[in-house]
């Protein structure tokens, strides 16, 4: 496995880790709010504010992940196009060599046949 794929796997792991940390922080904050000595209205407002913050964080994480995926897809497409061009060039080169060899062999064969006919 090349280091490129290993790095991408590590990024995937880090993305999951970040989401896990966000979820853990949210659960911990909710538990702290529920056990804190505050009125129901204050607690509900705190929970709503926390939920809004976490929603924004997750939305930002989602947008970053989409952007990274688009970058990776673009790089993969460029690499594929480059490899396709290289394969076409190699195939054309081999075809030209084969055509030249076939023409040379045909010329030699004609010369040999002409020698035998003229002998």
Image: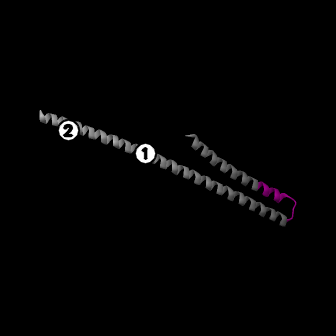
Q: Position of residue 44 (x, y in %)?
A: 80, 65
For residue 117, above or below residue 51: above
Q: Check if mark 1's residue and mark 2's residue have beta carbons within 8 Å.
A: no
Report the residue at 16% width, 37% height from top: 114
Mark pair 1, 2: CA separation: 34 Å
Specify whether residue 31 is painted magenta. Answer: yes
Circle 2 crowding by C-alpha within 10 Å: few under 14, some 14–19, many from 20: few
Figure label count: 2
Q: Residue at x 76, y 53 (%)?
A: 25
Residue that badge 1 annotates? 87
Q: Of label 1 and label 2, which has the lower sequence position?
A: 1
Q: Residue 26: x and y, percent?
A: 75, 56
Labelled disc at residue 19: none
Q: Is-magenta flag for residue 37?
A: yes
At x 73%, y 58%, the residue is: 54
> Given the current orientation, which residue lies at the most extreme right position?
37
Instruction: Give the overall secondary structure of the magenta segment.
Output: helix
Residue at disc 1, secondary structure? helix
The numbered mark at residue 110 is: 2
The residue segment tinted magenta is: 27-39
Which quarter of the rendering shows the N terminus? Answer: top right
Task: Using the image, determine if residue 100 lies above or below residue 54.
Answer: above
42 sits left or right of 54 in the view: right
The residue closer to the viewer here, 4 or 49, is: 4
Q: Is residue 56 above or below residue 79?
A: below
Check the image and tell me how it is coloured. Answer: one colour
Q: What is the x, y in percent for residue 43?
A: 82, 63
Which quadrant holds residue 59?
bottom right
Q: Position of residue 63 (x, y in %)?
A: 65, 57
User: Residue 36's quadrant in the figure?
Assistant: bottom right
């Amino acid at each position: 496995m090349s280091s490129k794929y290993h790095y991408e796997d590590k990024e995937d792991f880090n993305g999951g880790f970040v989401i896990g940390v966000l979820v853990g922080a949210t659960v911990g904050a909710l538990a702290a709010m529920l056990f804190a000595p505050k009125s129901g209205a204050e607690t509900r407002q705190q929970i709503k504010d926390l939920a809004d913050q976490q929603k924004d964080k997750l939305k930002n994480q989602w947008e970053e992940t989409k952007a990274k995926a688009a970058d990776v897809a673009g790089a993969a497409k460029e690499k594929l196009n480059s490899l396709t061009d290289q394969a076409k060039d190699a195939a054309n080169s081999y075809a030209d060599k084969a055509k030249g060899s076939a023409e040379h062999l045909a010329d030699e064969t004609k010369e040999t046949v002409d020698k035998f006919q003229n002998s």
